[in-house]
Each structure stands twice: as C-alpha cells, then as structure tokens.
Image (cartoon, rainbow, N blue to C red):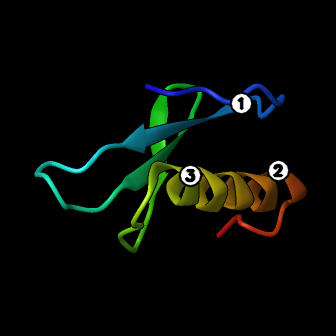
Amino acid sequence: MSETETNTHPYSLEIVPPKSEGGSYQWAIRKNGKLAQRSDRSLHSEAKARENGMAQIEKLLSGFGDR
C-alpha cells in the first residue's frame, strides 16, 4: 500500500497495480482503515492513479465528496 506524504487524516490512498501486464491501475480510499471509495475508471499509470485518488481525497476533506 502506498501512502501519501500530505496530511489526509482520516483518509489514506492505496494504489492498486494492474492484475495482468498491460492492465490498468486503480485506487482505493480508506477512512480509518475501512474502504470508503474506489476508482470508477481504469488509469494507465501509477502517477495518474495517484493524482486522481488525491484529487478525490481533497474533495472529501473539503466536504464536496460526501454523499
């Protein structure tokens, strides 16, 4: 599991590598260790997955990602 250096408490970002060669990356957001959200699309690189996941955490922290 890859953690970010920024303070995202209580959220953590997990980058999920492709299951097969040439596959896509996914991300999972955990809140206090429990799965809170997963990516809804496949991303072509680890960097894109991290960028997309962090953007979602920023929304959650600001209150715009709550449902």
- The amino acid marked with disc number 1 is Pro
Q: Quadrant of residue 66?
A: bottom right
Question: Residue placed at 60% from the left, 55% from the top?
Answer: 53
The residue most toward the left is 20
Question: Residue placed at 71% from the left, 30% from the top?
Answer: 10
Eye-nearest disc, 3 or 1? 3
**Left or right, 41 with reference to 60:** left
Cα separation between marks 3 and 2: 21 Å
On residue 34, the disc is none
Q: Position of residue 29 (x, y in %)?
A: 53, 45
Q: Position of residue 34 (x, y in %)?
A: 46, 33
State the quadrant of the N terminus: top left
Query: What SS does tag 2 mark?
Result: helix
The residue beneath circle 3 is: 47
Q: Quadrant of residue 38?
A: bottom left
Query: What SS does tag 1 mark?
Result: loop
Q: Earlier in the sequence, mark 2 or mark 1?
A: 1
Number of labels in the image equals 3
- Above or below, 28 against 32 in this view is below
Few, some or many C-alpha atoms within 10 Å of disc 1 (few <14, some 14-19, many ≥20)? few
Cα separation between marks 3 and 1: 22 Å
- Above or below, 6 against 21 in this view is above
Q: Position of residue 43 (x, y in %)?
A: 41, 67
Question: Residue placed at 65% from the left, 56% from the top?
Answer: 51
**Left or right, 20 with reference to 24:** left
On residue 61, the disc is 2
Does the residue at mark 3 contact the one at mark 2 (Cβ under 8 Å)?
no
The residue beneath circle 1 is: 10
- The amino acid marked with disc number 3 is Ala
State the quadrant of the C terminus: bottom right
